[in-house]
Amino acid sequence: VQLQASGGGLVQSGGSLKLSCAVSAGFTWEYFVTGWFRQAPGKEREELACISAKADSPFYSDSVKGRFTISRDVGANTVLLQMNNLTPEDTAVYYCATDFGAYSYAKMERLCTGKNLDYWGKGTLVTVSS
């Protein structure tokens, strides 16, 4: 399984960006849990949002809830992260990760907050200017 994140760039504070994560698995990637994470300089990697086929709703961390939206296009093997109302504190390298399994919300949340997914892509840099 390989992942490729794209869509990062430079944006002004208050602006928006949409990140895309393309998953190459050799088959239709449907029953997976996938998430977005970020790591700012000098800080630990932070979970942002995760989505799973069997969960009633996606998981969002408090830091992005209401501003970021995660979605998936199963046919295109892609997971998107729409980011709105960006601030300089959102500046970081953004990563997507995935793992096998269609989990309930509770299990997905544990995997997400534990950053315990097996497959990780290279990140894409998001810079928000003030």
Image (spheres, grey):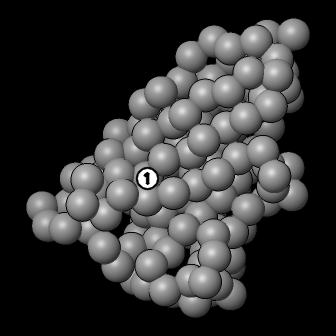
55 relative position to 84: left or right? left
Residue 52 at x, y percent in the picture? 50, 75
Placement of the C terminus among the 4 image quadrants = top right
Residue plotted at (69% across, 55% down): 47
Residue 10 at x, y percent in the picture? 63, 12
Residue plotted at (28% across, 56% down): 77
Mark 1 Cα shell of 10 Å, populated few (<14), some (14-19), many (≥20) = many
Point out the residue furthest to the left here.
26
Closer to us: 100 or 105: 105
Residue 96 at x, y percent in the picture? 49, 49
How many numbered badges does the structure rendering display?
1
Residue 83 at x, y percent in the picture? 67, 37
Q: Looking at numbered disc 1 in the image, what kind of residue is underneath it? A: Val
Q: SS at mark 1?
A: strand
Q: Which quarter of the figure has residue 113? A: bottom right
92 relative position to 6: left or right? right
Which residue in the protein does label 1 denote? 79
121 relative position to 74: left or right? right
Residue 54 at least partly seen: yes
Residue plotted at (69% across, 69% down): 59
